[in-house]
Every structure is written in structure tokens, then in C-alpha cells.
Image (tube, rainbow, N blue to C red):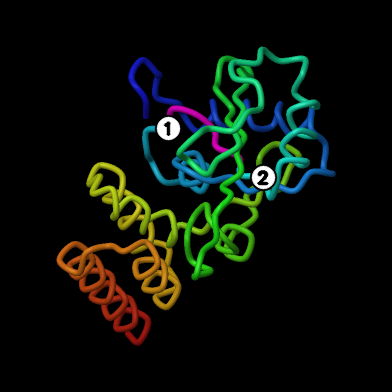
Amino acid sequence: MGHGKRSLSRADVTTALAMTLDAAGAAVPYRLCGTGAALLQGVPLPAGDIDLLMPGRPELHAFAAALAPFPCLHAPAWIPGSDQYFARFAVNGVEVELSTVERQAGSDALECVGEGPWRHHVLVACGPHQVPAVRLEIRLATELLRDRADRYGPLVGHLRAHGFDPGLLRRAMDAAGVPAARRRPILEGLRAQDRENFLNRKK
């Protein structure tokens, strides 16, 4: 979360995202990424904005045109050095960021690059909309790479409580390049929880 941004509640995200999608309609494909994707799935994390990933620049421009009634904080433009085409709007006081990530990926398990977000997502209710939000396994790998314990701790807790895909999580950690020393205790803790859940089901 950037300096000066207030921490958004789940209600903030749901309201602003629903307004965004009401304006954009259903024609433009997108994925909800970032902390907002986790917050919408029930993980208690501090979110500063809403990140929407677009498959390409035409889709981003179409989405941006639909958001023209809202204040534009950053017109669609290429961000040098980031492999990213980007725009930002303010919707109901919440920053909504649209972006592409225009580089190749050798894995399907990265959060915002390649096939990962398009293949690994869940549909989450947001007002009248079903929002495709990236899977928490690949979101967790992003936060582990950044070594943000305040972010990956709640994600791990949520996966322990609600279940997860071990294969996807391992592939996401591999693809992100999470150091072994950082990933080992996470995987061991999740495996221990899996064993406990299994034993409890057998009782």
C-alpha cells in the first residue's frame, strides 16, 4: 500500500469494484489481482487500491473509455522499465488501476504475467457481478517473494482454514523464485494443517 493511501475495507473494495463493473459492462475480459483480490476472497489484508489486469492494450482502452465518467488520475500510457501499460481512475474515492504486463513467462503460475491469472482464478460475488479473482496460492507466492510477513501471514492462515492446492502453490513459489529458506516453513506448516484436518475427518 503506497504512502498516503488509506487502508480499504472489504466494503470499500466491493462498492468501488461493483461501480467500476457497472460502468464497464461484461464485454471486456479482466482479472482482479493484488491485495484487493485477497480481500474480496475474505483475507483480512490492508488494501490501498484495486488492481485490474487486462489481456492487452485494446481491452485496457475499452475499459478506460467506459470509466470516462470517473476522474482519470493517470491516462493510459506505457510505463518505461515496467513492461506495463497502465491507467488509473478514482471510483467512489478508491483508486482503480488498469494494467497490462507485456512480457513472456515460462510458467502458468505467476500472478500477473503469462497464463497464470487467466488460468488460475475463482469467481467471487461482488454485488450483481461474479469477479474473476486470482487464486490465493499465486497471490501468496508474490507476497513471499516480497517478504511481507504482514501480508503473507493472513494468506497462510486463510489457506489453512479453507484449503488450498499444494501443487499450484509449489509451482507458484518456483515460478516466483521464492527462496527455499522462506518457503520451507510455510509448506511445512500447511502440510501439518492438512494432516490435522485429515485426522479430524477420520474421527
Q: Is residue 43 above or below residue 106?
A: above
Quarter location, residue 192 = bottom left
Bin the neighbour count of mark 2 within 10 Å (Cα to Cα): few under 14, some 14-19, many 20 and up.
many
Residue 131 colored magenta? no
On residue 47, which mark appears?
Answer: 1
Q: Chief secondary structure of the magenta span?
A: strand
Q: Earlier in the sequence, mark 2 or mark 1?
A: 1
Residue visible at 56% across and 15% down in the picture: 93
- Residue 55 position, x and y percent, is 69, 50
Q: Which residues are magenta?
A: 48-52
Q: Nearer the viewer, residue 134 or 73?
A: 73
**For the residues bearing labels 2 and 1, Cβ distance under 8 angstroms:** no
Q: Secondary structure at mark 1?
A: loop
- Residue at the farthest left position: 181
Q: Please name which of the two marks, 2 or 1, marks the residue nearer to the observer.
A: 2
Horizontal arrangement in the rendering, residue 158 relative to residue 135 (left or right): left
Specify the label residue 54 is tagged with. Answer: 2
Give coordinates of residue 137: x percent, y percent. Answer: 43, 62
Q: Residue at x 23, y 49 (%)?
A: 147
Q: Amino acid at mark 2?
A: Met
